[in-house]
Amino acid sequence: MSVRCRLLAAMLVPSVAPIFVPSAVVAQGTQPEWGRPFSPAEGRELRAEIKRLSIRLNVREDTLAAIARALGSNLRAITFDELVRLVASQATRAAQLQEQLTDLREEVRRLPDPRLRMPAERALAEATRAFQEGRLEEADRAFSELEALRRSESDATRAAWVDAVEARARIAELRLDYDAAEGLRLVAAREERRLSTARQWRLIMRAGQARYDEGEITGDNDALRRAVVLFQEEALPLAPRDERPEDWAATKHNLATTLSELGERERGTQRLEEAVHAYREALEVYSLDRHPSHWASTQNNLGTALAMLGEREGGSRRLEEADQAFESALRVTTRESDAYEWARLQLNLGSNLTQLIDRLGSAGLIERAIQAIEASLTVWNRDETPREWATAQNSLGIVLSHKAEHEGRAEIFESAVRAHEAALQVVTREKAPLLWALTQYGLGNALVLWGGHAGDRKLTERGIAAYRNALQIFSRDNAPIHWATAHNSLGVALQHLGELEDDTARLREAVQAFRATLLEFTREDAPLTWASAQRHLGLAWLRIGKRERDSSILHDALRAHEAALEIYKPGLDSLEQARAQVGLGQVLLELADLEKNRGYVDRALAAFSLAVNASVREHDPSVWANAQQGIGLAASQIGFAEKGIARLDQAVQAWTAGLEVLRPEKQAVEWAVTKGYLAAVLWEIALRTKQREPLQQALAHARDVAALPRTLAMASTIDLSIGLVQVLEQALAQWPTKAKSD
């Protein structure tokens, strides 16, 4: 979860990330003009929060109430919590306008012509009074009377008019009338030709920033697209790099931030790629030595864009570049200089490292991610910054799940679950539905991973319930990416439960979940995620086809895996490619058994062999072990059908290699199955070569499985091995006589 970017105006402006603060004064029960009901408890909370906000910002409560009413009447779909945060964000802008009005009064007081000065002072006094009393429309009308200043030949008077236009535009923004705000600024910038280029640029930059704010507040992508046009086509030509490099860099930064926000909302990668390019152009001007704060802010925002881009692309390059950008920003932003911003950077760093773990699986990355997220929690706490604290707890739970999966330790899984549950004690569905759903999703992941490790169906069922909770909020209309991702994870969990319970109905539910994922993640817009969903769909079809002995379903599984492999690129997506090759090999072996086609076995052996490389072993040993097991199965099938022992030896080598990374205390089932395969094939080699040593090795493997505690592996597997031990012991006892007779 990357923290949202910041926007640069003519100079750096405060972060647009909302603070957890309140909204407007409400009487008892419902305020009809808001178009929604509020409970008495909510009314009391709003009144108390408005009072605190008023004291902190020195903005009158009437003004804040008017801001809240404007938000409530224009944005009727937002939740109570969202309204609270938006009022806080708008209140900061109101405080800035209040300071601007003070400066404007002094500017008007110094006007040389009393015929213009005195009416202007009266109009400005009325506008200020109306603003402070929350009469925003009347404040706008009072500002319109300052239009007379425009007709003056005095540069100072016309400059005062431009500043009055800017103040009036800010009033329009507080009323959410962004069309009026832009119109006012553009008229001043385009028609007032005596303005310096720099002042024209500043007006257009503020118009672009207002459109960006509109997109943030209302969720309107068209507002963001309009901001792109203003920054790129209107402001940038007014700030040539060779003449005004810092203004040029600020424009590039704002353009990049808007493109990044659009890219987050839209499919594909084009907007994000453009954002990364623009940030890097800005960094050609902003240097660590001359512009440390600008440089750090741009590095942070560059990291956020790269992280989103890396999430959608294959490989790890973009995520590694994001890691470098966040670390660069932390060279300037310290806990001592800006604790809140430092904490946000640490969370961004940890979240990006968590994505890298998905691609590379490194234990070192896991520890770095935990360290970064825990650093943010030394600043944020449950009482003062509950939303940020909950977000960090959710992120901590995600990376702890990775650690638990890597180390196979139940206590770490439990810690991951506790982190998500702690976040849910603060984040409620009513106040913060999206964050609540994201936390439910993280909880579901932790429970499903834990259930898979422990073989505990109840944990998996709890995880599925958490996914379904998240999907009560995520919809394809309002959160399509989250909706599709949650369906994909739900499908994986249902598939696992279907395997545990031998339940085809669960597997068919998984198929429907994966199909839902593929409705949103298309091959063109999200190829990597589309390929992952295809692979999971193929695995679900494999399990169903295997149980129902249906070759047509197995061919569906085959097509799904082949589709996924068309996306993965050697070297870039080696781990995902290996997983898909293993799945493909498993499907081919089932088809070979069902259709009695040796060609499928040969293809399976080739697929498994492609999945075996040093990179896969390093990043996910279990995938490497599964590939080795597949090689063993395919080679042994060929070997049993052929004379000689070459293929059987290949199978033994593959299974032995797989055992190098399998541990009975962590992967008991896989370890036991591999040992069983080895025992059977070594026995066959002994029979063919009439050598005693392979038979002794077979007996040793069978004894290893028979000695497993029944808490680690299925009883049927252990019982089968106990029987095999007896048979092999008898064969070994008779071996000299049998060898001579042969």
Image (tube, grey):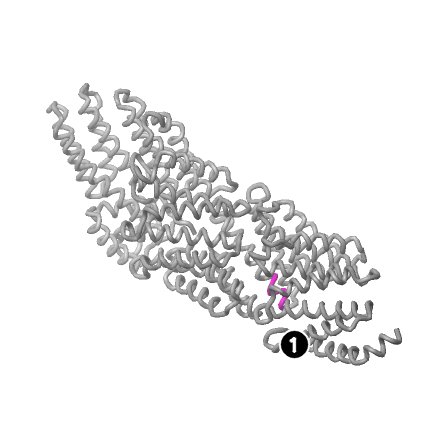
Quarter of the image with the C terminus is bottom right
Residue drawn at (35%, 55%), measured in percent from left and top? 388
Is residue 593 in sight in this rendering? no
Question: Position of 148 compared to 420: left or right?
Answer: left
Q: Position of residue 622 (x, y in %)?
A: 60, 61
Relative to 3, is 169 above or below? above
Q: Residue furthest left?
A: 114
Question: Position of 729 compared to 97: left or right?
Answer: right
Q: The disc labelled 1 sits on which kind of residue?
A: Ala
Residue drawn at (61%, 45%), measured in percent from left and top? 569
When asked about the image quadrant of residue 325, the answer is top left
Disc 1 crowd rating (10 Å Cα; few below 14, some 14-19, many 20+) is: some
Extent of the magenta region:
495-500
The answer to if 340 sits in the magenta stretch is no
Residue drawn at (60%, 54%), measured in percent from left and top? 614
Relative to 422, is 324 above or below? above
Question: Position of 715 compared to 337: left or right?
Answer: right
Q: Taken as a whole, is the magenta stretch helix, strand or loop?
A: helix
Can you identify the residue that label 1 sits on? 715
Residue drawn at (67%, 67%), measured in percent from left and top? 674
Is residue 641 in sight in this rendering? yes
Q: Position of residue 453 (x, y in %)?
A: 55, 67
Residue in front for this viewpoint, 364 or 312: 364
Q: Position of residue 17 (x, y in %)?
A: 34, 47
The answer to if 498 sits in the magenta stretch is yes
When asked about the image quadrant of residue 104, the answer is top left
Question: Position of 250 compared to 565: left or right?
Answer: left
Q: Secondary structure at mark 1?
A: helix
Residue in front for this viewpoint, 415 or 673: 673
